[in-house]
Image: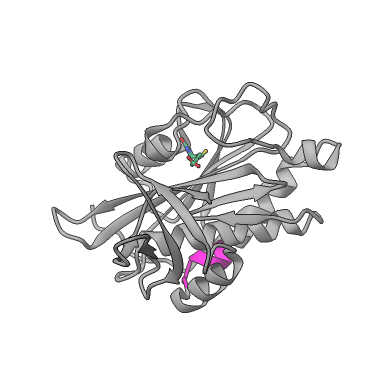
Amino acid sequence: MPFTKRDEMARVFSYVEVDSTQDEAKRLIANGVQPPFFVVAEKQTKGRGRLGRSWVSEEGGIWLTYAMIPAQGINPLVYSYGAALAIKDVVEELGISTRLRWPNDVFVLKAKVCGILCEADYYGSGSAMRLIRLGIGLNVNNDVSKVIAPYPVISLKMVTGYMLDTDQLKRAMISRLEEFLSEPDKESILKRYQSALDIIGKTVRIKTKHSSLLGKALGLDEEGLLVIEEEGTKEKLHLVEGELEEE
Ligand code: BTN
């Protein structure tokens, strides 16, 4: 289906419960809805995360997908970095300090508060992106005590000690995401994202689905891939995906 870029504000489709906002976005598109649009749900029964993990999505959190037509020539990573910066800003406006963990997690007090999943569809078997679905999960008032994950997990309510207004936060997220990503400025996103990352120059371990490597994080390349100088070999690897651990 051919899509055309539009300048107006994106529509928001709100649900009480869906399987996954990513899948609902796919269905809306299959039924002829033109991106850009947002899908938000109070609860997901089959929320999914990166690296094939499931994502616990109980009531009280913000589960959102931003479906859009990407600008050609911009790596999907740039979109997920822009989304991480947008969420960082929204959370910091509440007076809470955040850290970004590569590639696109937002951490508060050494625990993950927000995860981002970027899924893209391509034209035929080529490398030109046709559509992008940016899925964002933010733990707000939801109970995260039973979440099983290979990293500590936190909600904003655990940090503030009180319930937050999820409608207000949702509106802030949508407006910041549109501001950063409807016409993304690749150079400025990469510059801001790299300076928000505090691993540059440090030794890190990156785990992928099948391997693990240790090396010094040198920075981002011009497409946004993380450049690691592998310990021992000094080979420079450009990474698009993985799970980062600081040594
Ligand atoms: C991660 O593993 O860190 C990414 C988590 C992404 C979760 C969000 S919640 C909204 C959207 N719908 C999903 O099924 N997943 C993403």
Quadrant position of residue 60: top right
Residue 53 coordinates in the image, percent (x, y):
42, 32
On the picture, is 89 further left or further right than 23?
right
Q: Give 89 or 213, whichever is nearer the viewer.
A: 213
State the residue at coordinates (54%, 43%): 64
Quadrant position of residue 40: top right
Q: Give 216 or 112, whichever is nearer the viewer.
A: 216
On the picture, is 38 further left or further right than 126?
right
Furthest-front residue in view? 232
State the residue at coordinates (71%, 43%): 167
Report the magenta residues as a range.
178-184
State the residue at coordinates (15%, 59%): 126
On the picture, is 81 further left or further right than 154?
left
Residue 227 coordinates in the image, percent (x, y):
38, 66
Q: How is the image coloured?
A: one colour
Q: Give 238 or 126, whichever is nearer the viewer.
A: 238
**Number of on-image labels:** 0
Residue 186 coordinates in the image, percent (x, y):
44, 74
Furthest-right residue in view? 161
Furthest-left residue in view? 125
Q: Is residue 91 magenta?
A: no
Residue 162 coordinates in the image, percent (x, y):
86, 37
State the residue at coordinates (78%, 53%): 96
